[in-house]
Image (cartoon, rainbow, N blue to C red):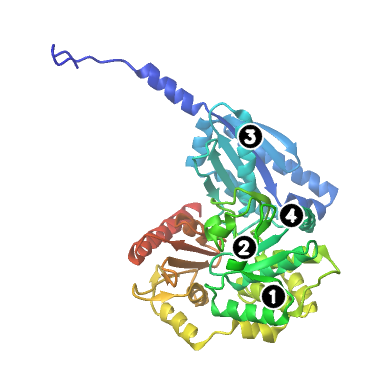
Amino acid sequence: MDKASGVLYFFDVSGEYEATVELVTSRPVIGVISVDNYDDLEDATSDSDISHINSFVANFVSEFASKYAMFSRRVGMDRFYVFTDYTVLEELMNDKFPVIDAFREESKQRLLPLTLSMGFSYGDGNHEEIGKIALLNLNLAEVRGGDQVVVKENDETKNPVYFGGGTAASIKRTRTRTRAMMTAISDKIRSVDQVFVVGHKNLDMDALGSAVGMQLFASNIIENSYAVYDADHMPADIERAIQFLKKEDVTKLLSLTDAMKLVTNRSLLILVDHSKTALTLSKDFYDLFTQTIVIDHHRRDQDFPENAVITYIESGASSASELVTELIQFQNSKKNRLSRMQASVLMAGMMLDTKNFTSRVTSRTFDVASYLRTRGSDSIAIQEIAATDFEEYREVNELILQGRKLGSDILIAQAKDSTTYDTVVISKAADAMLAMSGIEASFVLAKNTQGFISISARSRSKINVQRIMEELGGGGHFNLAAAQIENMSLTEVGDKLTQLVLDELKEKEKEE
């Protein structure tokens, strides 16, 4: 507007606007599709049946691509590439990729254990970079358990978006992959001067057991390997276990303070039972290393170590202790064998994460447990380590009594603002609440002894507590997850958790 003359000017910018829209919607998209569990099925199926399965998979993906006018190309029996533009990808994202559910249901009708994992990426220009990110997204979908889609723009500042994952981990790990991982990890250990193994903050028995196991694994390759613990923050069961291990005097244990003095620029850090740097035993200790190995059974998330040279994540495994014990089995070294107490601590780790072999167990879990028993795993020692003292028992029940029902089958217990609890107590309360009749999911939130707000989440088979905890900065598994939150009050976290649970229930209703 020209104020002096009082004339109002209008400019036609529709051309520029349409050009901008065209630029955004025509951005190239590359997708990679993988068929979960195909290798296992191929090994156990006759040639004629495999031929029928291949036809089913190829026709399904071809029809999916044709429906959205995408170009597709099969590059392997279980691998496809698709090419399209952002308009199509946006439609798929708005519909939440119904192809994932459709393929799973059609596979079920054919009595096939197959699901799809997909990685998509898009951006401006650089097709090579877009393709690389699409492959990374596919890998992320697979290590999170499969049966899902990961989409991320070709931009380092953008976060991945997840679709699917509404069922428990569907990908089955193979012995071939475990053997390959054992070889790769062994080769890497040979190239360094020292190995330090750490679990996550607020160490539990699975983190300690897998750390002790990997220390033994590394000791069969090089002389200097250590399982590291934080002497200032140890729950009672961890303290008892470490005392047992020190008394046996087989495992090389180091306190965090002592370990920090020994690190060199050729040292290797192995993270067990976690894959988020924010959850590691000590961020200052982690920052001393230029190369890490990650061994975990939780679904991979953001905040993943940038310096990871080997990643062994199997979200279908019961525990990190199970994964580590399998690596030791395949190593089959005669130099240092599992001692009685090492086997006991590994068994205790498995028992913790499987709730005494009643949850998330497979035939592989029992195979590993049988092996640990042959190595001297002692049930009496495990009972002594895991024993609950009276004060802990009282605190668990104190939290349970704060529980309230959300709907007919969900329990949420929010502690009093003036009380703090150990994270072990919080998780035990969540376990106990889930064991109650008719309860599908349980959530317990309380201030922990370090001043943060901790949430432990558990579910049976219908509710994906991992998705809920990820919204709060945490993570875990489909039916076992947790989060630790700063800079929010207990009431604020409780309100947000309640809303997220309600949102998840609505999402579940839509899927059904």
Find residue 347 and name its label: 1
Q: Is residue 29 left or right of residue 506?
A: right
Badge 4 or badge 2: first in the primary sequence = 4
The quadrant the N terminus occupies is top left
Which residue bears the numbered disc 4? 192
In this view, which residue lies farthest toward the right? Answer: 334
Residue visible at 69% across and 46% down in the picture: 35
Q: Tell me where residue 337 appears, x and y as whole percent.
A: 81, 72
**What residue is shown at x 53% (from left), y 33% (from top)?**
88
Q: Nearer the viewer, mark 1 or mark 2?
A: 2
Gap in angstroms between the C-alphas marked 4 and 2: 17 Å
Which comes sooner in the sequence, label 1 or label 4?
A: 4
Characterize the local packing of mark 3: few (<14), some (14-19) or many (20 or more) Cα atoms within 10 angstroms: many
Name which residue type carries label 3: Gly
Element marked by disc 1: helix
Amino acid at circle 1 = Met
Give the distance between the C-alpha atoms of the residues marked 3 and 1, in whole angstroms: 42 Å
